[in-house]
Image: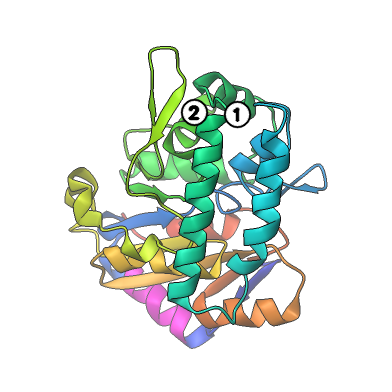
């Protein structure tokens, strides 16, 4: 299959065998959102996240975009720096997110701004996404989206609603705001989810999700960052297949991804491999 790298064929076949033996009713999907379920590039321009659309557009106060871009320029290189320790990275990413959320509140973020971002046409799902969502719904397979999205649960829910894909088997763990009666954001709810602390998000803090997934110990994890594999830390699982969406051209980064993901999907490609893997598992 084009644009697919299997890091270790023997290991992959063994994991696939276990998934097939146990069947679909033992599976749940654990997925990041930005650049995982969505495309990394739209019209040949990189779209790193939902909040990047807000940052690069004229949505809030005149100085918001400038200040947000300064934060991005300062912290984003640190996010991908392999020489920074895990604990230091957590500290830096928390610092970035807290500062950015404070900026969003000061800049008058409103629910209407999220609606405008979602309707911009710049947040596009990967090819094969609708097929995946219908398959999961029809087979009652839970999809848990764990995202550090800066515009959080509201934006993800709204984008799924736009496609009529916010099915009852979809659960979202993400940042969330408190809103006043006029739809203005007045606070960010705790805990804040950022790219480096997904390993600390305990599934026990979400009773409904914990109940739904506790007997589904075979997990298909989907992510686009090296830290995304740590989403699994809060879950009890029996078998795990990690599928990474590698959107870079840098060979040294590819090798790092091979070390943590079982399968790499290259070149901002589709979800076809995920659909292929799931459809080979008996009901």
x and y, in percent, of residue 268 in the image:
70, 57
From this view, report whether residue 42 is shown above or below residue 254: above
Q: Is mark 2 on a helix, strand or loop?
A: helix
User: For the residues marked 1 and 2, what is the alpha-carbon distance in whole angstroms?
Assistant: 7 Å
Left or right of 220? Residue 239 is: left
User: Does residue 260 appear to the left or right of 174 in the view shown?
Assistant: right
**Residue 277 seen anywhere in this rendered image of the structure:** no
Secondary element type, mark 1: helix
Q: How crowded is mark 2: few (under 14 residues within 10 Å), some or many (20 or more)?
A: some
Name the residue at 39% across, 56% down: 30
| Magenta-tinted stretch | 11-19
Which circle marks residue 158 in the picture? 2
Q: Can residue 222 be seen in this view?
A: yes
Q: Quadrant of the N terminus?
A: bottom right
Q: Residue at x 25, y 72 (%)?
A: 238
Residue at 51% x, 64% y is 92
The image quadrant where one finds the C terminus is bottom left
- Label number found at residue 118: 1
Q: Which residue is drawn at 60% across and 80% down?
A: 256
The colour scheme used here is: rainbow
On screen, residue 282 versus residue 59, left or right, reads left
Residues 129 and 118: in front is 118
- Cβ–Cβ under 8 Å for marks 1 and 2: yes
């Amino acid at each position: 299959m084009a644009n697919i790298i299997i890091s270790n064929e023997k290991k992959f076949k063994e994991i696939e065998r276990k998934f097939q033996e146990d069947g679909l009713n033992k599976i749940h999907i654990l997925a990041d959102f930005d650049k995982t379920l969505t495309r990394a590039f739209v019209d040949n321009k990189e779209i790193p996240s939902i909040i990047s659309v807000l940052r690069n557009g004229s949505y809030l106060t005149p100085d918001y975009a400038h200040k947000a871009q300064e934060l991005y320029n300062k912290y984003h290189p640190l996010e991908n720096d392999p020489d920074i320790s895990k604990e230091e990275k957590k500290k830096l990413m928390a610092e970035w997110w807290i500062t950015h959320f404070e900026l969003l509140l000061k800049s008058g973020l409103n629910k209407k701004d999220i609606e405008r971002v979602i309707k911009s046409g710049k947040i596009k799902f990967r090819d094969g996404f609708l097929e995946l969502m219908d398959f999961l719904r029809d087979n009652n397979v839970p999809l848990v989206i764990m995202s550090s999205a800066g515009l959080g649960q509201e934006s993800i829910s709204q984008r799924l609603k736009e496609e009529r894909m916010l099915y009852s088997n979809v659960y979202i763990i993400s940042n969330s705001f408190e809103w006043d009666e006029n739809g203005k954001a007045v606070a960010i709810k705790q805990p804040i989810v950022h790219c480096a602390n997904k390993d600390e998000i305990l599934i026990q803090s979400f009773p409904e999700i914990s109940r739904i997934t506790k007997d589904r110990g075979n997990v298909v994890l989907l992510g686009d960052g090296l830290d995304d594999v740590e989403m699994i830390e809060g879950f009890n699982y029996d078998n795990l297949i990690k599928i990474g969406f590698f959107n870079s051209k840098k060979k040294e980064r590819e090798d790092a991804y091979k070390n943590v993901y079982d399968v790499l999907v290259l070149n901002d490609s589709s979800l076809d491999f995920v659909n292929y893997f799931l459809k080979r598992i008996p009901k």
